[in-house]
Amino acid sequence: MHFNLDQILNLKKWQDLQDSLADVTQLAIITIDYRGKPISAHSKCTPFCQKIRDNADLSKMCQKCDSRAGLEAVRYNRPYIYLCHYNIIDIAIPITNDDKYIGAIMAGQIKPSFSGAIPDLEQILYSPVSLQALQESQELKHLYKEIPTLDYGLILRISDMLFKLCNYIVDEATDKNLVVSTSTSPVPSRQSPSPDTSLPVLKDTKLLPALEYIFSNTHLMVSLEKASQLCHISPGYFSRSFSKEFGVSYTVYTTKLKIEWAKELLTRTDIPVTQISEQLGFSDPGYFTKIFKKQEYLTPTLYRKYAPSPGA
């Protein structure tokens, strides 16, 4: 499952947070999605950079810098600090979830000062056009001088802080949204069986003995062979009849059923996950967690943490 940043974040609250971070760190900040599209307004954009970005030709250079920096940040999965086409410090901070790139924080618009050794920072783009525009405009020269300066060591610490903070917030928001999007997923049946083990309504009544046995023995893993024996028909015929009745295979149906029961136990009880696994017939808690995550896109523990309370 892939979420866009604007789907999982409250953008108004995120903008407020971004504005506060920009005010405290003295960095200009903007948030972009994985396609490079801004999902927030610029916070603390310097007058110089705003002037450059308002220029159709010069803004193309800014976009090229942003694009390349984003790729570098994703490649190394850490903040990428570089010099833009005006030798100003900028930072691309990747935001990932479950090893997927979903966006980035673009920060910077700051001049560095160095209290120690000067690092070998990459200038992503050298642009004679940009330098010529700066030389020919007294207004740009003045605005360039007004760009704030920050110690490079502090820039490194701020970059690390933003990386950890923003990814943590996005991870938490993503987990919550996964629960919201999956908590109402029905078991594929004509009448979804509830965790209280009420039976679905069947058109094909010859399948009823197997369903009654499954719903009465939630602690067992009932094989297809066992289910077909209970119905006194061959496994092949049972399998075809079951798929016709429910629209999915016997294995898919029973797996989803187990997970639905697990979700009910997770939200209504404090039973440990390992005990729930055993209670539903899983011999290995690790395998239970793997199957649960495959269906619900998060672990049983996270589901219990964020799932809405019954009746909420």
Image (spheres, rainbow, N blue to C red):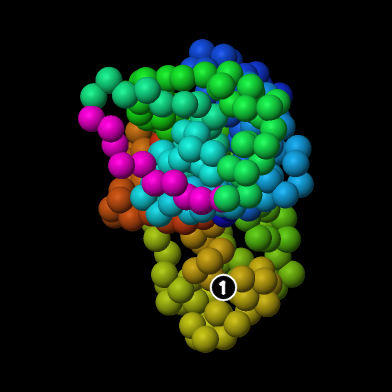
**Position in image of residue 42 (x %, y %):** 67, 29
Q: Residue furthest left?
A: 117
Which residue lies under the disc numbered 1? Answer: 249
Q: Is residue 242 above or below residue 170?
A: below
Q: Is residue 284 left or right of residue 172?
A: left
Residue 181, by quadrant, is top right
* Mark 1 burial class by Cα count in 10 Å: few <14, some 14-19, many 20+: some
Q: Which residues are magenta?
A: 117-127
Q: Secondary structure at mark 1?
A: loop
Residue at image coords 74%, 69%: 203
**Position in image of residue 295 (x %, y %):** 51, 55
Q: Is residue 245 above or below residue 235?
A: above
In the rendered image, the quadrant that contains the C terminus is top right
Q: Is residue 207 above or below residue 235?
A: above
Q: Amino acid at mark 1?
A: Ser
Let me know if residue 245 appears in the view. yes
Residue at image coords 56%, 21%: 145
Instruction: From the viewer's side, name the closer residue of 15 and 232.
Output: 15
Residue at image coords 49%, 76%: 228
Q: Is residue 89 above or below residue 230?
A: above
**Position in image of residue 171 (x %, y %):** 49, 36
**Position in image of residue 65 (x %, y %):** 55, 48
